[in-house]
Amino acid sequence: MSDEVLRQRAWRIAEQLAKAGGGGEAELTVIPNGYRIELDILRPHGTDDHAAVLTALALGDRWGHHYSPPSRNNGTARETVWSEVHHNVPEKKGS
């Protein structure tokens, strides 16, 4: 996959995450094998669309979520979701 195609794919994920995640801005960074998209979920509770966030994350080759409870952040929960797109994605083996 060309770098331009990979970059376009990463930007598409970033745009969808930003729309779904309550209006925050997704951050796109270069990683050794592609791109990583991260979004801090900003919200009054309930302004993000969980299904749309999951749908956007699943467009990547690898994804995850970090959560830090209010007790660790002066009373404010912190959530970050991330998705990565890679050059040379290993093929999945059939069952």
Image: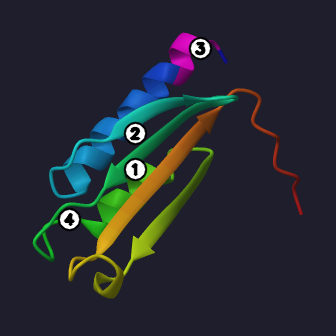
Separation (CA) of disc 2 from disc 1: 6 Å
43 inside magenta stretch: no
Q: Position of residue 37 (x, y in %)?
A: 44, 41
Tag 2 near tag 1, CB within 8 Å = yes
Secondary structure, mark 1, is: helix
Horizontal side of 63 relative to 18 (left or right) equals right
Image: magenta residue range: 2-6
Separation (CA) of disc 3 from disc 2: 15 Å
Q: What's under tag 1, amino acid-wise? A: Ala
Give the mark, 2 or 4, whose residue is nearer the N terminus.
2
Disc 1 marks which residue?
Answer: 56
Q: How is the image coloured?
A: rainbow
Disc 2 marks which residue?
Answer: 13
In the drawing, what numbered circle is on residue 3?
3
In the drawing, what numbered circle is on residue 48?
4
Secondary structure, mark 3, is: helix
Give the mark, 2 or 1, whose residue is nearer the N terminus.
2
Q: What's under tag 2, amino acid-wise? A: Ile
Tag 2 near tag 4, CB within 8 Å = no
Tag 1 near tag 3, CB within 8 Å = no
Separation (CA) of disc 1 from disc 3: 20 Å
Give the mark, 3 or 4, whose residue is nearer the N terminus.
3
Q: What's under tag 4, amino acid-wise? A: Asp
Q: Is residue 19 above or below residue 68?
A: above
Q: What's under tag 3, amino acid-wise? A: Asp
Secondary structure, mark 4, is: loop
Q: Is residue 69 above or below residue 19?
A: below
Q: Position of residue 78 (x, y in %)?
A: 31, 69
Q: Position of residue 75 (x, y in %)?
A: 20, 83
